Image (cartoon, helix red, strand yellow):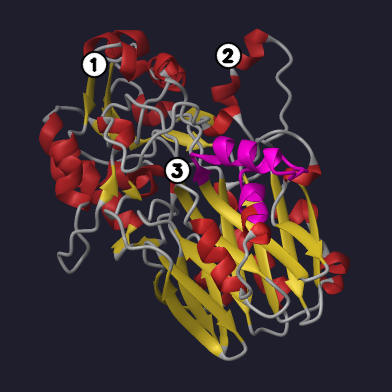
Amino acid sequence: MSINEVCSVFGIWGHPDAARMTYYGLHSLQHRGQEGAGIVVTDGERLKGIKGDGLVNDVFDEKKLDSLKGNGAIGHVRYTGKSGIENIQPLLFHSSSGSLALSHSGNLINANDLKHQLEMQGSIFQTNTDTEVLAHLIKRSGYLATKDKVKNALSMVKGAYALIMMTENELIIAQDPNGLRPLSIGKVGDAYCVASETCAYDLIGAEYIRDVEPGELIIINDDGIHEERFSLSGSNAMCTMEYVYFSRPDSDIRGINIHTARKKLGKQLAIEANIEGDVVTGVPDSSISSAIGFAETAGIPYELGLIKNRYVGRTFIKPTQELREQGVKMKLSPVRRVVEGKRVIMVDDSIVRGTTSRRIVRMLKEAGATEVHVCISSPPMTNPCFYGIDVSTHEELIASNHSVEEIREIIGADSLTFLSVEGMMKVIGKDDLGKNCGQCMACFTGEYPTEIFPDTPLPYEKEMK
């Protein structure tokens, strides 16, 4: 597995210690981005921000948080991208008519075209982010009210976005017409909060209220919460990989608990695989829930056959190719007494390039496993993503260029089973009340929910939020 979600957003309004609440909210969302973090606050008169490279607790300390006074704040954690502090969000802009801060999760697929048009009209860009394109569109709008400027700007952009904006006196939240990236609203005391995942609410003691609907614009200020629309809702197309890999198990998205969804995927995978084995083990961490579901349905004991090393830093230096090849051993270790002499069923969430899977299979066999059967709780990933995930080109996706049997040979497994598209939709296509949730399956099926532009950059080819 080697794909990454590229960012996460958090916002709060009406809390006397908004910056500190945002700090804790970002901590809960740290799994979605470890390369940079930022917080902007408002005291009702001006916006002030602090941002930097690294984890949330690398960027902020007590002194910095104490300097961020205000009852409204937005924050952001970034996965990766081009270097430069100017690219870390929230982006903050000042003008004679007021200030604006923006935090954005997703990817604008027509950003290149819009940026070219704006530059031809005199705009000068200071960052490599498509988020700045939104700021220019908002500023150049001829409307007077901020919400109308935002609506006008959003009518021109296409793609995936969960967006939080802040002026001196309000928060503005928007979700793209297809709802591709998760975003929800919560409340803690009298304060409203917004987050990419509901797990952020648990840490700050907030109550989940609801998801932001596709095409919805929400304004939060001292008068309360105001709900409008900037677009008719398109086909609901939440990213399926949120359920499979990205979101934390304790989060809920569109009425579906992530742990429950993954467990159901594992149960369905066990039915489709129908493989005999002695132990089932999951690749930490995102595959554990699926492995438990697989083991329950297959009637095979679940064991901790692989242990994740929690103390491998993101800055670990691998100076030689030989050490790079050993990198997976720094992160995962097989439990020899569990796998030795056993037929091991290894459950993972996906295979992208196949290199990690090959190394894990080899480790298990070196630890004494007699057989290693690899079972994947998602279909083969055959298509790149244009909506904010750093999935590579067709050429780099192993399932785009090889059959399942060829992949099995490459990774050295005794058998390889992928979950079917039909099986996936059967278990996560509806919420707990039976309502059709709608998912984007483009990386598995090639059926994209939006128009794809000829020069649409992949997230890893441009600045990633």
Q: Name the residue tied to disc 2.
A: 325
Earlier along the polypeptide chain: callout 2 or callout 1? Answer: 2
Q: Name the residue tied to disc 1.
A: 404
Give the residue displayed 28% in from the left and 49% down from the top: 439
Q: Give left or right: position of 305 versus 50.
A: left
Q: Residues within 10 Å of mark 1 (few under 14, many from 20)?
A: some
Give the residue displayed 51% in from the left and 71% down from the top: 201
Give the vertical position of 175 relative to 243 (above or below): below
- Where is residue 26? Give x, y as percent: 62, 60
Element at badge 3? Answer: loop
> Is residue 120 within the magenta segment?
yes
Q: Which residues are magenta?
A: 107-136
In terms of image quadrants, where is residue 244? top left
Q: In the rendered structure, which amino acid carries the disc numbered 2?
A: Glu
Q: In the rendered structure, which amino acid carries the disc numbered 1?
A: Val
Element at badge 1? Answer: helix
In terms of image quadrants, where is residue 227? bottom left
- As measured in the structure, the alpha-carbon distance from the residue carrying label 2 to the one carrying label 1 is 24 Å
